[in-house]
Amino acid sequence: MGAALTEALVIRGLNKTFAKPAVSDLDLTVRAGELYALLGPNGAGKTTTLRMVAGLTQPDAGEIAIFGIDARKDPAAAKALLAWAPDEAMIYDKLTPLEYLEFVAGLWNIEPRAAKTKAEELLSTLGLASEARRRCEGFSRGMKQKVALAGALIHDPKLLILDEPLTGLDAAAARLVKDMLQARVDAGGTVILTTHILEVAERMADRIGIIAGGRLLAEGTLDELRSRAGEASGRTLEDVFLQLTAEAAA
Amino acid sequence: MSLPFKPASTPWLLAHEIRLAWRGAMAGRKSRGPGSIIAFAILGAFALAGGVFLALATKGHEIPIIPFAVIITDMALAVILTLMLSTTLAASADALYERGDLDLLFSSPLSPRRVLFVRALGLAVNAGLWFMLPAVLLLTPAIVMGHPNWAGVFVVLASAALAASGVGLLLAMALFALIGPRRTRTVAQVMAALIGAAFFLASQYRNLMGEKASESLFARIALDVRDGRIQPPPFADLPLRAAVGQPIPLLILLAIGLGVFLFAARVLGRRFADAAAATQGAETRKAAKGPTRDFAAGAFQATLRKELRLISRDAALLSQVLLRVLYMVPLAFVMVRGAAHLPAWTLAGPAAAVTFLAGQVAGSLIWITVSAEDTPDLLAISPTPMSVLRRAKLAAALIPVAGLLIVPIAALTWYAPLAGLWTALGAGLTAWTAGLIGVWHQKPGKRADFRRRRGGSFLAALAELVIAALIGGATALAVAGLLVWALIPLIVAGALVMALRRTDEQIAAALRAASR
């Protein structure tokens, strides 16, 4: 496929069918160092696409390259570069956040001393330092999300994929997470996120992709999407999104 | 499909519970494929054939109400009651903590008493079914062929289930009041295990106390009663009279069962709702103190450490392991005590049993570590090869087994080195094969489903049992000095293990098929 290293993720001709097509001939490119928001109505194929990128679901056809590495041919090398945080936190209730991060760091083979320092740093940044050695079973949904986010960041992934990262977070925690993601992008990291909160995409994303029925309807900056939808410059992303998805459904 | 009862009535709620339970059971069956249905059908046919044989053998004969029959019935009922109580106590504690639809029910206008009544009835049905089903198969032919009064057995079992359910609930709530929500679940699970094993341990009193090897206390009592050396206490004949259909004893037992059940349901009502609400977040532990440990190096060590932590923090798992350990204790006593002065062949039986139980414990642990993984997606997105993770999980399942066996086997080896060696090898081999089968035939399940263990292949579970029995047999023969003969069951077990073997690709394909 010959993807240049300026491209964090390149998807070509991706297809996946369950009972009906979930993703159809999807082409998508995410540049290194950008925050890309993937939007779409429920059942549009966002999560299926991201699960295929993360290696959790096998595509029926198509190519996926992560920083130039063919994720289907060399999944271990591709996985080493990415992190995936779904809307349901992947954590263990009977482990403490610190123990959880120890496990995740082990999975990514991070040097133990560096991992411990990084774990303490992350928990402190996320406001979980005082809970670091308490089991997660009594945590709120938002706290569990934060632990999972720390897990996603412990190995410093080049590509961070987040499915609905703000679900269950209170206003302060949501702000904290948004700031962390922005800081990550500012530092050269790449973030792909899905969200139903369009204001988040509007404010944070460098580029936005709108997907429906498993197909990419439109892609670009907010202004590009506005002009694509024939909307005036003052219109919100919500207007653009609703118009494009309504056109696709018609 | 709507339920044919007045909405919000007790029968309506009960029908709702039964519908959910039925659909849950059927979903499990479907996912296990036809193997389990065939196996259950075969077991059922055997039980029915046994029932026909029993009916023919007892045609024209009634069970005499004599002290020997009375004491046998009493002891059987005591065993059944302790096992039922063990089930209902554990389930009562779970009912408080596993939210399920409790929040919905308690937030509805339904009275908490009605909700508890139906839940408690569900506990009774669950506990009773395990005994009722085989009893129906075994006794129906006799009931049809001249012993209609034996249907009393079903009423006795139902009464026992009701009483066990009531006592289970009362005990769980008493624990809740005494030690609080944080500890109740664990203590109730451990207590359930102890109650479950109580009868067995009591029966092994003589072995444990060293009075005489390999003799059950209850066998002794039964023989003493038969020979007239002791007389059963007053009213001891009630269960037998009820079982053979005498109306007054039958009514008395039913009244006792129902009385205990209704008393528990009535007294607890609102308190159960309050206790269930109080469990929300109550299992949160205090933060650990002291210096933090260094992080594990690498995926194998990190996974091993994580699995051992999860095993040690799983109350349901610990209670099940404890139950099996309790069964092992008398055997270990017999072996170690007998090793010094008894001939080798007398150690063969206990050695086989210890070997078999080692496989059972390992099987439970491997199910928890491999199939009941809480976050399979996290493992799947990591760059660590699955083979490394599986090895770590296998090791995590085998380490506790080694820990449990090390003391009895070391003691045995001290007195009878060869018997100790063969038992260690046999136990290690069964644990290892149980672990491998658990890896090869894993089927993802939830930790909470542990007590029902095996959302996985029924035939694989059956094969695991057979293999453990074969290696147990080989160990027994080796301990008895019949080394050449020990090779036969060992070779059969090896062949079975090879037949069950799956490659990584086959495991992945089976998991993909299961997730569809």
Image: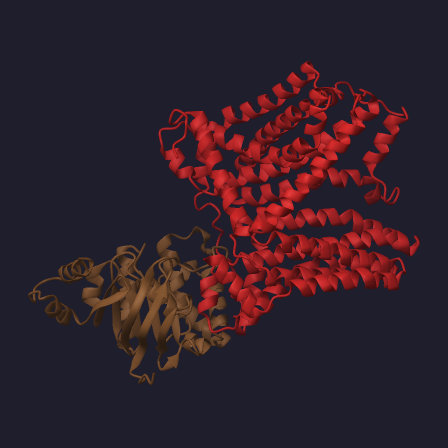
Count the numbered circles shown. Answer: 0
Q: Measured from the top left, where is residue B318 in percent x and y?
A: 62, 50
Q: Measured from the top left, where is residue B122 in percent x and y?
A: 53, 33
Name which residue lies at 56% across and 66% down: B506
Viewer can see residue A205: no
In the rendered picture, chain B carries what hue? Answer: red
State whether residue B271 is above or below residue B480.
Answer: above
Name which residue lies at 75% across and 41% down: B201
Q: Measured from the top left, where is residue B374 in percent x and y?
A: 49, 57
Left or right? Give the position of B126 relative to A134. Answer: right
In the rendered picture, chain A carries what hue? Answer: brown
Instruction: State how the image is colored.
Output: by chain
Left or right? Give the position of A130 relative to B263. Answer: left
Left or right? Give the position of B232 relative to A91. Answer: right
Location of the N terminus of chain B by quadrant is top left
State whether residue A45 is above or below residue A77.
Answer: above
Q: Measured from the top left, where is residue B267 in percent x and y?
A: 51, 25
Viewer can see residue B89: yes
Left or right? Give the position of A227 relative to A151. Answer: left
